[in-house]
Image (cartoon, helix red, strand yellow):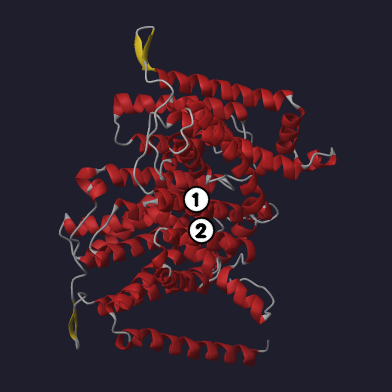
Amino acid sequence: MLGSVYAMVALGLTLIYGILNVPNFAHGTLYMIGAYFAYFAIVSFGASYWVALFVSMALLFVAGILLERIVFRPFYDKPLINSFIVAVGLILVLENTALSLWGPEFRQFSGPSEKVIKIMGVMITMQRVIVILTAAVMIWLVHLFIKKTRLGAAIEATSQNPDGALLMGINISHMRGITFGIGTALAAVAAVLVAPILLIYPAMGHTVIGMAFVIIIVGGMGSFIGAVLGGYIIGLLETIVTSYVTNFFTEAIIFGLLVILLAVKPTGLFGKSHG
Amino acid sequence: MDEGGKVMGKKKKAIILCILIVIILSIPQIVKDEYYLHIFVMSGIWIISALSLNLILGYAGQLNLAQGTFFGIGAYATGLLMQKMGLSFWVALPLGCLLTAVIGFITGLPTLRTRGHYFPIATMCLGIAIYYVIARWDDVTGGARGLFGLPRPDPINLPVLGALSFESTQNCYYLVFFFVCLTILIIYRLISSLSGKRLIAIRGNEDLAQALGINTMRDKVICFTISTLLAGLAGGIFASYMGSLMAENAHFVTSFEILLNVMIGGVGTLIGPIIGAIFLPILSEELHFLGGWRLVVYGIILILTIRFLPFGIVGGVRILLGERFKKEG
């Protein structure tokens, strides 16, 4: 279940990284914003869960395009460090806006079904099944989009070689905007899916973004399959460590493992070498 | 510039420096308001942390997003040594710094192997991991409740002036001033030395630096370790001055605040982080009426600064003065 969420967040992150060459530190914050949008769609406007999911996804898609356009675009030809710091600035802006507008308290909305079902002798809530299935469908859709459509092919081309793509007549700026939108929309879906199980609060993105970065490093930055597999591996690992070892230092153990992995193989398990 | 001009320049600089020191030293005599003195003390602590980050970011070009965490480690180490072991501040502080530097060294070894994008990410993950250890290790760090009742530094006995106690904000101001000067001295010595030049070479092009026979890994690790030591120093002073610690002090928001000081002031210069660390706490007081929106404004200022003034206030002043842009070495 956790694995599905991580896989989606990491997938969005890795798409953005692949095409913008920017590690978007604000991704977790956008994930949080997505959850709040859905919350207000449901609580204030009485939308159904699935409508809220769609609304939040659409809003975050637009937000992603706007952010890319306004915040990140001026920095493409600048030193990398500038983009990092801009992303950090974005976290400050978004998170504290959420904190000021909506307060620090925990919120929750319920999923479409509270039922508990039994699969092969294991009790599992319906929401968890929904999370797993929806995530799988979303990942599959993104995969189809990139591999089977012209737009997807253009995005892939841009990520492989921006200059080459430009020569082929691809509008790189558009591709970057769209990719950013898709990436943030994926984060929104992940957040809305998991919100009925976990809680919504302004700092909810912190752990997730940390984990997502662990995943795309483990999976290799910019690698599609690496992000998805890495997501499931880390989700499983976290569950195992929490259940069998300790639930106090789970994050510390996972981040510790990451640091060790980086020391041994700095480009990740599936990664290509970097310059 | 001929030799005479250089000497003149040096003399002028020395005079300006002396005047500045006199002004800074006389501030507590003029400003009697405890509250403003408190802000100045905090500025001093931020100056030390900003300078420590600037060392690794501005000179070696490595964005360490765990600087606030090392600040927190130094703070907790010093605080715990004083509280649990009953050590004096003057023993606890160096030990706390040393411990921070050891942790910095151990964590620097694997993280500094990474380059480009991976280093900020690795340090951010590191920061989150250490934050969780501090926030959850209830038995030692007090967990989410925090650490309370830390003593101020013990009085020191001066031969002529008698015992100097640090109960008053005024004396803490002088204490912090001393450590700021110490930090500036350490960093100044370091960057004017050959290893400072090597660090700048690494910032420029790490592969090229390596090809020229610089042991980039060694220089980076040394720089990182000193940088964490100084962050620990700032943390240790903070712990004793404030008397209480929260896990939030080690959170990556602290790293962001330090980063903000460096970037607003002017990264890669010695004076920039100092200006930033004086300017921001004052700005922060002015913006107090905004409440939680204060940090939103911070974020916007940060983004705009990077966009239009990549070298912060110092860079802006240089453009205004029309000076040919050159970075201080």
Q: Looking at the image, do the residues carrying marks 2 and 1 touch, with CB atoms under 8 Å apart?
A: yes
The quarter in which the C terminus of chain B is drawn is bottom right
Which is more toward the observer, A145 or B140? Answer: A145
Residue located at (41% from left, 48% from top): A102
Q: Quadrant of residue A194?
A: top left
Viewer-proximal residue among A64 and B289? B289
Where is residue B69 drawn, in percent x and y? 38, 53
Q: Residue at x 32, y 85 (%)?
A: B31
- Taking A205 as reference, is B73 left or right? left
| Lateral position of residue A69 relative to residue A33, left or right | right
Within-10-Å neighbours for mark 2: few <14, some 14–19, many 20+:
many
Quadrant location of the N terminus of chain B in the rendered image: bottom right
- Share a chain, discs 2 and 1? no
Residue that lies at the very extreme toward the front in this rendered image: A45
For disc 2, the marked residue is: B299
In the rendered image, residue B104, in percent from the top left (x then y), is placed at 40, 52
Q: On the rendered structure, is B206 left or right of A233?
A: right
- Residue labelled with disc 1: A94
**Which amino acid lies under the numbered mark 2 shown in the image of this protein?**
Gly
Disc sitting over residue A190 in the figure: none
Residue B326 vertical placement versus B65 (above, below): below
Secondary element at tag 2 = helix
Percent across and percent down for residue B41 are: 33, 73
Farthest residue, direction left? B86
- Which chain contains the residue that carries disc 1? A
Q: Is residue A109 visible?
A: yes
Q: Amino acid at mark 1?
A: Leu
Point out residue A258 in the picture as x, y percentages from the top left corner: 46, 36
